[in-house]
Amino acid sequence: MTDKRLCRRLGIIGTGRVAHALMLALAPYADLPPLVWGRSREQAEALAREAAGAAATDLRAIAEACDLIVIAVADDAVAAMAAGLARDLAPPHAPFVFHVSGRSGAAILNPLAAAGAQIAAIHPVMTFTGNPRAEIERMAAAHFAVTVSDPATLPRARAVIERLGGTAVEIAEAQRTLYHAALCHAANHLVTLLAGASQALRTAGADAPEAMLAPLVRAALENSLAHGFSALSGPLLRGDGDTIARHLAAIDADYPALGAPYRAMARATLDEMERDGLAAASPAIRTLLN
């Protein structure tokens, strides 16, 4: 047993990728093997076996036996799980319960708080691909968004993140949706952007567009993370309207599906340039993009 104990017994609600990684990462900080509940008893048993734990027959077993409980289910299921678990809590038992959904704060767990539990939202800012051992290592370099209803709960949330090796960042309940939108804008829309660029390159005759893009995009990503918007380069920054006009003509002729996202991102880039004080967009370029 480690000297950085978190709890007597860990309870895991859910059997997916995040539940898997968190169970393996947190189990060493409990006195007893974990208890796992999932809609599929077989999946819960398989998961529990990896940490010499057991599958719970129902939520009541988790509520009664565990003092640290992780709700790692789909976003839409968090509220129902919290309500069900709350019905099974009996004073004076007061576990620390947190969910890992990005979009919701701690308030979604209020039924548990009303039943005596300490509550928090702890969201790891990373993707989980199904390799829990690798993900445990990646959590050690990750940031975790923490939202609490009661400041007295914050030390317990920070203790969990400390054991995972991550960095805690407090996000207010009222800002939780904006936080999640920012993550989706960065990660999800990047995938869409690269898919469009790859398909346009393929249409232009490139046999391996992803390999062609990789060095360029990786350099742009690293420069952007290191230097912010000042890492911008290209024809918009130079005010090269002729190049932009040629781009638009080629896109409209040969790969029109790229037209709307190209124009939207170009307009957003011009707006950011003006906010950042880099340059004012010429009216001619604005007209081209509109």
Image (cartoon, helix red, strand yellow):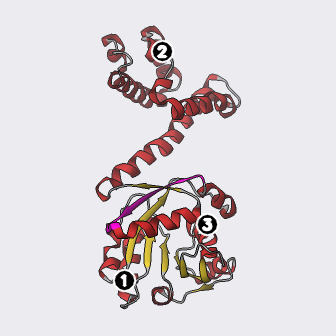
| Identity, as a three-letter code, of the amino acid under mark 3 | Ala
Asked if residue 149 is among those painted magenta in the image, a careful observer would answer yes
Asked if residue 187 is among those painted magenta in the image, a careful observer would answer no
Q: Which residue is mark 1?
A: 86
Secondary-structure class at tag 3: helix
- Seen in the image, is 54 located left or right of residue 78? right
In the displayed structure, 250 sits above or below 47; it is above
Looking at the rendered image, the quarter that the C terminus falls into is: top left
- Seen in the image, is 5 located left or right of residue 284? right
| Picture residue at 37% right of the left edge, 27% below the top | 272
Q: Residues within 10 Å of mark 1 (few under 14, many from 20)?
A: many
In the displayed structure, 232 sits above or below 18; it is above
Identify the magenta region.
Answer: 141-151
Q: Nearer the viewer, residue 46 or 150?
A: 150
Q: Which residue is mark 3?
A: 21
Q: CA distance from mark 2 to mark 3?
A: 44 Å
Point out the residue furthest to the front here. Answer: 3
In the displayed structure, 246 sits above or below 166; it is above
Of badges 1 and 2, the one in the foreground is: 1
- Contact, CB < 8 Å: mark 1 with mark 2? no
Residue 99, can we see it? no
**Would you identify the image quadrant in which residue 98 lies?**
bottom left
In the picture, the disc for residue 235 is 2
Looking at the rendered image, the quarter that the N terminus falls into is: bottom right
| Picture residue at 49% right of the left edge, 85% below the top | 62
Secondary-structure class at tag 2: helix
Which one is earlier in the sequence, the residue at label 1 or at label 2? 1
